[in-house]
Each structure stands twice: as structure tokens, then as C-alpha cells.
Amino acid sequence: MRVNTQKGMSVNRVFVALGTALAMLSTGPASAQVKTPGPPPVAGARPVTIERITVHSPAIEGNLEGDSPDRAVLVVLPPSYRANPKRRYPVVYALHGYSIGVEQWIGEIHVPQTIEGAFAKGAREMIVVLPDSKTAHNGSFYSSSVTVGDFETFVARDLVGYVDGHYRTIADRRSRGLAGHSMGGYGTARIGMKHPETFGALYMMSPCCLSTRALGTPDAATEAAIRALRSPADSATLSWGQRAQLATAAAWSPNPKAPPLYLDLPVKDGVPQPDVLARWAANAPLAMLDQYVGNLRRYAAIGIDVGDRDGLKDDAGKLHAALDSYGIANSFEVYPGDHTSGVAGRVQDKMMPFFSRALASGK
């Protein structure tokens, strides 16, 4: 999609939207499942245990979109968990990207192989928790919305509380990490800025949606398609990009008085709506960061990585630069790859060792 940067262009030719939410920039056609290469198996890796559970979230109850407050969650227990009933473990919460659920997420990052490989290569053992945050429009953006539900609080309060209550965790923020890829990287930035009382280290992989961008001419067909929907479930008839716009509006510009979708679009009759655009901009982490500098200083470590062929690279670099400008310690790496090609290897060889170093460990 061409970006119109001409000065003085008419307002009805500007459509500010999430460049990253609409262009995840995979190498093939956009789809719910992206095939990714996995790292070679590590010799001698011991098996982990994966438990599939359901966590009820009061924060998601009553959402206008009808998304279930009963969320599927995968809990990956380290090799020594069963054999050491008195040992407690740090926990990493890992958030998936847009248009997939948790089962697709573990396929993309090749779990359990990558977690087993990380432990075999020297990472300290920890519990890894992967929640499902897919919604009627394919993604919650880990935001707080009456339309979608408060997925921010689901992660930061309900999920953490459940895991601490049912597993042998070290129930201390210094022993909890938050990570995510793409939309999950956005969720890590957003939740991390607002909830340092819950998490002690952050790792963002190819984070999307760090800023809003001008994407050129409004698409009248997209607006018409969305406004023709008669229920949230009807969004399944939309294209991937149209559905991503709808998910963004549901998360960032909810409107309880606008049935049947209960949201405001950033364009009406082809004309941009400045008030809606301002609400979207207020949810962009690059705009939010100044408000949460004190919170970000509390983290033991912050990591960011992105592929050198990923369209999200520039915004990831801007986040790194913004943290640097405030003297907030963070690591930033641009590696060879596109949006998804390196994600499984990064989980094994970068993310897990990062938390192994950053999180406080029990006895």
C-alpha cells in the first residue's frame, strides 16, 4: 500500500490507521497460520509437559462483542517440575499475534521443541504460559474495551492470579516475564508500561502497532463492507486486512451506543473522523511512553528484536531510541529475516535466555 506524503493534501485523502496491524508483512498471502522454520533439535533435550486449561476472566465478562470470558491457555511445565514438588519457578507469559489463537501460536514458534531446546542449551527452567486472545474479529490487541473485553486486565490480573494459584510459581513480579510477537509484542509494550507491579522483565518480538501511520486514500469499499455487517460474527466474511481494521476499532474506539458492532470507525462516508483517529493514536505505545517512564524504569530488563526485512523495523527502532533518550536500559537487535521467518529460533536462542538472565529465581 502506497503512503501518501504530499504536503497540504486534502483531509479526505488521509486515512490514518495502524500500518502494522494491516500489514503484518509475511512473505506469503496473509492467513491465520504462517509456516515458520524451526531451529535444529538440540541433542539431549528433556521433554516438557504441556497442560491445556481454561481460565475464566471476570475482566472479559459482559463484553458487547460476545467474546467468551473462558479462555484457552497452554501451560508449559519444565522437565523437572513433576520430580521436584517443592521447587518453585519463574514464569514467562508469551502473547500471540493477530489472526491466530494459541494452538497456531505454538505451531509458529515450534513449542515444545524450542522451549526444550532452550533449557538444553543452558536456560534456567521456568514455566511458560501462552493464553489465547483471539476474538470475533481475530484479535483483542490486548486492550481494554467494553466492546472486546478487558484483555489487558485478563493478562495482568486474572491470568497471573490463576497461574499463581494453581502452579508452583514464584509469585513475585521480579520472577515474571512478559513477551509477545507482533500484536503480542504490542500487548507486551502496552501491558508492560501500565503494569510494572505485575511483571519484572519485557521482551518484544517484531512489535506491531507502536504508532499510527498515514496509509493514503480511504478505501470506500472497506468502509461499506464493515458498515454492512449485522453482527460481530459476520466479520468472518471480510478480507484479512478489513478484519484487522475492524479489530482495531473494536479495541481502541469502542462505542456501547453503536450496535451491532459497538465501535466507531476512523472514516465515515469516506471522510476521516479526527476524534476517532485521536483515540487510536492514544493507544500507540510510542505516544504513550512519556506517561510511563517511571514504570518502565522499574524493569530489570527490556528487550526488542525485529527482522531486517520486516516493515515494523523502523517503529521498533524508534521505541528503542525513545527508551534510550530517557536512559532506560534496553537491548535492541535487528536480525536477518522478515516478520515471521526467525520467530521460532528467536524464542529458543534469544527470548528464553533473556528471561533466564533477567528473572529472579527461587531456591
Image (cartoon, grey):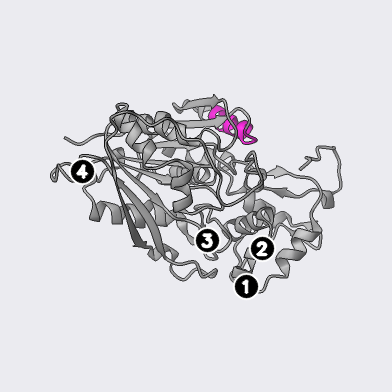
Read off the residue under disc 2. 264
- Name the residue nearer the viewer: 305 or 7: 305
Dot 1: within a 10 Å radius of its alpha carbon, few (fewer than 14), some, or many (20 or more) residues?
A: some
Read off the residue under disc 1. 231
Read off the residue under disc 4. 81
What SS does tag 4 mark?
loop
Query: Does label 1 or label 4 sit earlier along the sequence?
Result: 4
Residue drawn at point x = 27 percent, y = 32 percent: 124
Residue 78 screen position, x and y as percent: 26, 41
- Distance CA(mark 2)–CA(mark 1): 15 Å
Read off the residue under disc 3. 135
The residue segment tinted magenta is 310-321
> Is residue 55 located in the magenta-colored stretch of the structure?
no
Q: Is residue 300 visible?
A: no
Q: Amino acid at mark 4?
A: Tyr
Q: Are marks 4 and 2 in contact (CB under 8 Å)?
A: no
